[in-house]
Image (cartoon, rainbow, N blue to C red):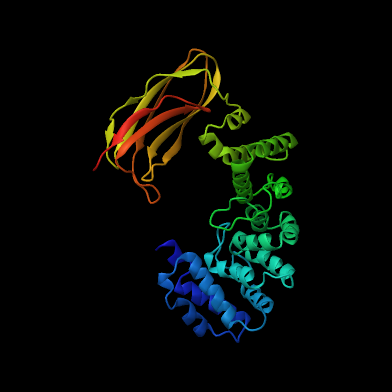
Amino acid sequence: MAEKEHAISPARIIRIGDEVKAACPRFDVRAFTHEVVADLSQLELKARITRTSEALRSHLPGTAAEAVDILLRSLPPTPEAAGITNGSGLHIYSPHSDFVARYCRNSEDLEHALTALARFTQYFTAEDAVRYFLRDFPDETLKAIDRWARDSDFRVRRLASESTRPRLPGSIRVTVGVDVALPVLDQLYADSSRYVTTSVANHMHDIAFDDLDLVLSTLTRWKLASRADEKEFDFIVRQALRTRLKAGDAAAYEFLGFPADPPVQLSPVRLEHTELRDGDTLAFAVDLSASASARLRVSYVISSTTQTGKLRQKVYFLKEAVTETGQLLRLAKDHVVRSTATSTIRPGTYTLELQVNSRRFAPTEFHVVEG
């Protein structure tokens, strides 16, 4: 079953209606369900959420704030009672947060709305809804977010980091500065929940696109504070710098203890085949020789040209090693060249480059031909 069909399905719409009716006997489950599911199969996921939220507004009595109270009462007593077994929750509750952002984003209902979002996020993560408040009421929303960072529920703490990410996927951009949420991250980077620290790492990863120096200085400060478990802190650092490492950013490598210009040489790359078809394996090998001891992180880069003439590069991790003076290291990989849902392998000239720390070596060509 496709994600959208499973996430907001007719069966789940009926469940929403039944839960709401238990909190509000006047609620017409049949009319609500009919309004939502009429052409549900034709709608993408976000449109399904919107449709459900709009139908809730049509059929819930009272003001929008009063309707939010009904939705809060309709929730099962705990996330576990709702059948939630993961951190992000069940999409069945995504319309609830959407309802708050859509109908209670005003100064009169603001405090009530933000409190409701902190509750709803325990059933389905509410960062997308929060961002509309962050855009329209930045000061008030940031005060609430600061409180969330100290909440006893890990899902609410995670909301504090996730909702303020500069580049949150699939959501609106907010204009607050990339450093605005650093006090929140200062609170959360040593959190006991991996669900929270993953958000912190992704938040730092977002900042690194615009201000790597800020990320490195913040990571240095956290490291010196020694609050975080060493293994968890290493996880945050690697995740935060992952795109910068792929790009060969010298400062990111130096921060992790890899020399930006390592004392190594590579032999010419040996390709088993230079002509491939979609689905074939690109098998390659290369010899690395070290003239001094060094800590190395080796990647390989496959480049091609898109239909519009733009350069497209994909970077893949290969190996980490510590070499001694005079050591010879053989590197090899069988890489399947295959089209995916997000990337099409087209006939043409491709190049393979080896990257050792931030240093890239001479490219080797291969060709993809019609299958």
What residue occupies the far bottom of the structure in this picture? Answer: 26
Q: In this view, does 366 lie to the left or right of 79?
A: left
Q: Is residue 166 above or below residue 125?
A: above
Q: Is residue 168 above or below residue 242?
A: below
What residue occupies the far left of the structure in this picture? Answer: 371
The structure residue drawn at horizontal position 55% and vertical position 85%, both measured from the top left corner, is 28
Q: In this view, does 2 lie above or below 166?
A: below
Q: Is residue 62 visible to us here?
A: yes
Q: Position of residue 270 (x, y in %)?
A: 33, 24
Q: Position of residue 87 (x, y in %)?
A: 58, 57
Q: Is residue 334 left or right of residue 122?
A: left
Where does the C terminus fall, quadrant-wise? top left
Count every numbered label the image shows and give the total: 0
Q: Is residue 180 left or right of residue 314?
A: right
Where does the N terminus fall, quadrant-wise? bottom left
What residue occupies the far front of the structure in this picture? Answer: 309
Q: Is residue 170 above or below residue 350?
A: below
Q: Position of residue 296 (x, y in %)?
A: 52, 25
Q: Where is residue 252 in the image (x, y as percent from the top left)?
A: 60, 32
The structure residue drawn at horizontal position 37% and vertical position 48%, both measured from the top left corner, is 340
Q: Is residue 77 visible to us here?
A: no
Q: Quadrant of residue 274?
A: top left
